[in-house]
Image (tube, rainbow, N blue to C red):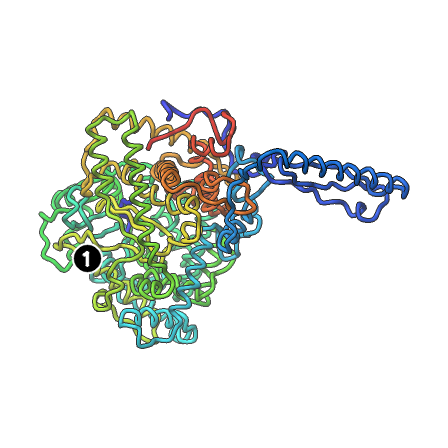
Amino acid sequence: MNKLNSDCNGPMQMGDISVIDNKSWKNNEVNNGYLKQRAAAEESLLGSGAVSTVVQVAGGGTKTMVVPGTKPAKEKCLVATVLALIIFCGVLVLIIVGSKQTPCLDTRRPVCLTEECVRTASSLLSAMDYAADPCVDFFQYACGTWNKKHLIPEDRSSISTFEVMADQLQVILKGVLEEPINLEDNEATRKAKTFYNTCMDIFQIRKIGDMPIRDVLDILGGWPVTKGPNWTPPDFSVEILLGRIRGIYNEGVLVEQWVGPDDKNSSVNIIQMDQMQLALPSRDYYLKKSSEGDMTAYHKYMTNIAVLLGANKTSASEELEQVVEFERRLANASLPEQDRHDTSVIYKKLTLQELQKIVPQINWLEYLKSFLDVELTDQEPVVAYGLSYFQEMGKILAETDRRIIHNYVLWRLIMTLSPHMIDDYQKERVEFRKILQGVLSERHRWSQCVEWTNKKLGMAVGALFIRDNFNHESKETALNMIHTIREAFNELLADNHWMDDETRAVAKEKADAMNERIGYPALITNKEELVKEYASLNITKHEFMTNVLNILKYDAQQNLQKLRQPVDKNKWSTEPAVVNAFYNPNKNDIVFPAGILQPLFYSQHFPKSLNYGGIGVVIGHEITHGFDDKGRQFDKDGNMMQWWNNATIKAFRERTQCIINQYSRYKIDEVGLYVNGRMTQGENIADNGGLKQSFRAYRKWVNQHGPEPDLPGLNLTHDQLFFLNYAQIWCGSMRPEDALTKVRSSVHSPGPIRVLGPLSNSRDFANAFECPEGSPMNPKNKCSVW
């Protein structure tokens, strides 16, 4: 659903534009505590006059000596004799001096040499670029070698530590889903395993072919482009068509619709509507000339899928040009993502009668009655986000031929269903993704099937996952960390000078009232409750596409049945086996699924510095979301209201503008575009706040428990390790096509920016690495919100 989730006294002054380009940041003259050894030329091993560089590590530092390759025999003998005398005299002096003085205390810090510490140190070291200067480009310093080693696979548009962790999790899920159904399984886990097995049954899928999709299209009046000139509009309205696709196939076309908590009264579920999700990643693809190639590929994909379903290629190509143009007009009517951040501005609560007057081109009561199984009148309250889209969309519909509308609506359903198909359908999808994402091949079938099973039956898969693959002690550890980081947030809240006392007190109440959800819900450990969760879902043993259709209907009904029901604020809304974390403003809760409680984010064997630099920053990030540009609009009970006074709001916006300006100066060199500081401001605020809170919490832990033993071979303090682990979470690279998509549509800044931005704002980081003021990673002017 397209649901709205989720110190600087002015604009930051930066002399140069920051560019994500390793060459522009690299400083090969700085060793940063590591010995940069030059490879000796082959001649030094064989030639008589060669010179080799030998590095010796002494107690006080490093020495480099140039040793000639050969010497005459007499000279060698003389040198050896003199050297022996010097050594003898030196030892004698040490013995005499040592006998007269008290022994020196060993001031070296203790080093952890357990297997876990050695393995952890090795992992950190293997990712780093020792030649890079951490005060110039910390991303290159932390991730340079990782990025060289990890090439982007042909079936991906990017590679990152997040994706590597997700891949590792997928392998585990593959294992539990492929275990034969046994006595330990309940009806819910049986359904998950059966769905996965039907997804992997290529022979049966090929045997059935695309008949399930063709049957769906016929039920909905036929896809005009495949019926040719003989197609006639069905005897039901466009409203009924849209309603059936929403209620039976869980697809929102033209309008995104769902039932959920009212933003202004979070204990009550209400009908909500928003602009639809476009087929392509963002409206820019439809409206910018630089993306005409993507639009051509989109039209070709649409045409080729139509041909597979029986259309004539020539006539289909011409007819579907009109469909693309129709969607282009809808894209132009939609609000850009950066204009949707202020929820209070785009939220509009009204009755169906009022909506009907504003958008008369659609019979709203008929639309909603076609899929909602409750009594509705024109006095039914609804919430519409971005009402201007609805007004423009209504005008577009009134001006568009019924055949074009029908073609487009059914195409969007086909786009949802066809990726589950194989052979020719898969081939066409790969060709389209080559242009749009730079992806050269399709993923392994098992990987797709694991992802679909986890997304569609997430609680059942989670139950299988936690049996043998989750350390339950980590829930308690994470809970303790949440408490310490929340304390750090409250301390920073008390220290800030831009917020008035009354608002500060209410903000503390909100932070203290946040609900923590860690690992998984109790539901998945309760057999009866888990079975009940999926009781209405029918999964067949041999027909994969039938199962897909059954799940779409199940998902639709699970949401729609909430109308007239009280909001269940204890219900989880995400699957446990996922590498992610969430903040829900309507519930004021922070969620950390079991899938993210793994390295690099967390390990029971990690030093606290790494856990606080990993999952600790994630915890702080999610807490800060409750106070970012969106979250601050909701109170501790999840209701949207103005609980800040005007002076505090003004001060917040000034500080937020500093963040917007800073991030808008980062340029993604591969595509020649700057980060959208407005669109990404919420996540950037959360990154900066989470980092500051978690480091403060870590230092408090050290003060209470004492310093930790060093990790071997790194020559880094634990303060430095905190920031290193944080940075290595974002190691990765992306294809230009993916970079373009992220800049245009993602509310998250690209990985390198998520390292450079927060760390360059952090005085703690600058102190840890002793970065000179004015260096790229320690600018004089810094941005700070929380």
- Return the x and y of residue 505 as percentages of the image width and height: 21, 32
Residue occupying the point 54% across, 33% down: 136
Amino acid type shown at disc 1: Leu
Question: Can residue 684 be seen in the rendering of this structure?
Answer: no
What is the crowding at mark 1: few (fewer than 14 residues within 10 Å), some, or many (at least 20)?
many
Question: What residue sits right under mark 1 in the picture?
Answer: 560
> At numbered mark 1, what does the secondary structure look like: helix, strand or loop?
helix
Q: Quadrant of residue 460?
A: bottom left
Question: Can residue 698 be seen in the rendering of this structure?
Answer: yes
- Quadrant including the C terminus: top left
- Return the x and y of residue 479 as percentages of the image width and height: 30, 49
Instruction: Report the side of 683 relative to 774 (left or right).
Output: left
- Of 613 and 176, nearer the camera is 613
Q: Quadrant of residue 286?
A: top left
- Of 87 and 704, nearer the camera is 87
- Of 707 and 215, nearer the camera is 707
Question: In this rendering, is residue 179 above or below 773?
Answer: below
